[in-house]
Image: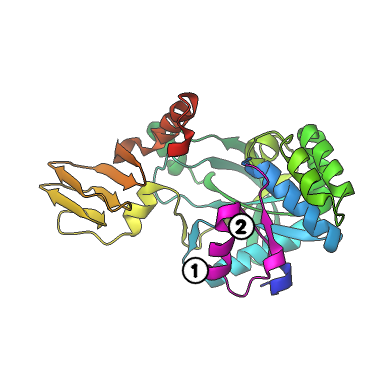
Amino acid sequence: MFPWDRIWVFTKPAQKEDVLAHVPGLISSNILIEPCPKGTAAAIAWATARIESLHPNNVIAVLPSDHLIEDEEEFRRVLDAGLSFAGSNPCLVTFGIRPSRAEPAYGYIEIGRLQNKVGDKDCYEVTAFHEKPDRETAFRYISSRAFFWNSGIFAFSSTVLFESLKKWIPAAWEALERMRSFSGSMEEASVASRYYNLIPDDSLDKGLIEKASNVVVFPCDFGWHDMGVWETYYDLSARDKDGNAVDGPVIPVECRNCLLISESGILVAAVGAEDMVIVAEGDAVLVCPRNRLGEIKQVVEKIRKEGLAEYL
């Protein structure tokens, strides 16, 4: 859909070489390196500002890299419709995935009335965003055709994003203005590092999208999977006769319907486990029932509070 000079990647310093290795056609100067760890609001705002400086009055699609898309042609069609709508309307466009299961690890979008059609693609107003629910609430959501998974894929014009930042995350806009004023200068890197750190550590969803009134959603069904969710990994993995998905040096004995992974070379042995996730990676091990994977965020928060963030 896009020429190489219009494709940008925003990533961490340690991942630049991996990005170039896996995407050899990517232009090296189109890789933006995060000055310090922040939420997606900071990343998307700065990336938009950099792109705007080279391509004024543009329309941008934001695409998280850890998604698996099965039906690529349908994905292109709905993304093209969303970009077209964003280019002709002062809206923030989201893409909602029709739920295939009651998944507590995802946020949900509740749709309202049909607002428009772009070709054969429907565009709805957004009634509300719902944070990651408990499993019972997730079951209620999927019984209604008015709830969709929030994919984290967006389309907008740079003008609309900047106006939204001014209104909903003014601290981010102030820092961005400082950074933009040094664009292309010798001081750009040091200034960017200093002011990027001042941007609130919010996701674009919580900091802006969920507050704005000019948000629309295109319902989608193109075989979307978020590979950052362990249940998705289990669903897509080959399983043995007992329903276990195994990767790495793992010995299961009388285990049923488990996800068992060792990515650190450590031998993982499990006896009598059922419907469990056990993952060994680096110097950390995760053990969790599959039906409680939505609670992992609480563990992450506790690890950070305990000063153990190096294990995340």
State the residue in front, 289 or 286: 286
Residue at image coords 17%, 47%: 256
Q: Is residue 2 above or below residue 220?
A: below
**Mark on residue 63?**
2
Q: Is residue 209 above or below residue 252?
A: above
Q: Are marks 2 and 1 in contact (CB under 8 Å)?
A: no
Q: Is residue 87 left or right of residue 252?
A: right
Q: Residue at 34% of width from left, 35% of height from top?
A: 292
In the picture, which quadrant includes the C terminus? top left
Mark 1, other Cα within 10 Å: few <14 / some 14–19 / many ≥20: few
Question: What residue is disc 1 on?
Answer: 71
Depth check, mark 2 against mark 1: the one in front is 2
Residue at 24% across, 55% down:
246
Query: Which amino acid lies under the numbered mark 2 shown in the image of this protein?
Result: Leu
Label 2: few (<14), some (14–19) or many (≥20) C-alpha neighbours in 10 Å? few
The percent position of residue 91, horizontal first and vertical second, equals 76, 49
Residue at position x 81%, y 48% in the image: 160
Question: Which range of residues does the magenta coloring cover?
Answer: 7-36
Say what amino acid the circle numbered 1 marks: Asp
Asked whether, in this view, residue 189 is left or right of residue 82, the answer is right
In space, the residues marked 2 and 1 are separated at their CA atoms by 16 Å
Q: Position of residue 176 (x, y in %)?
A: 81, 43
In the picture, the disc for residue 104 is none
Task: Give SS at disc 1.
Answer: loop
For the N terminus, the quadrant is bottom right
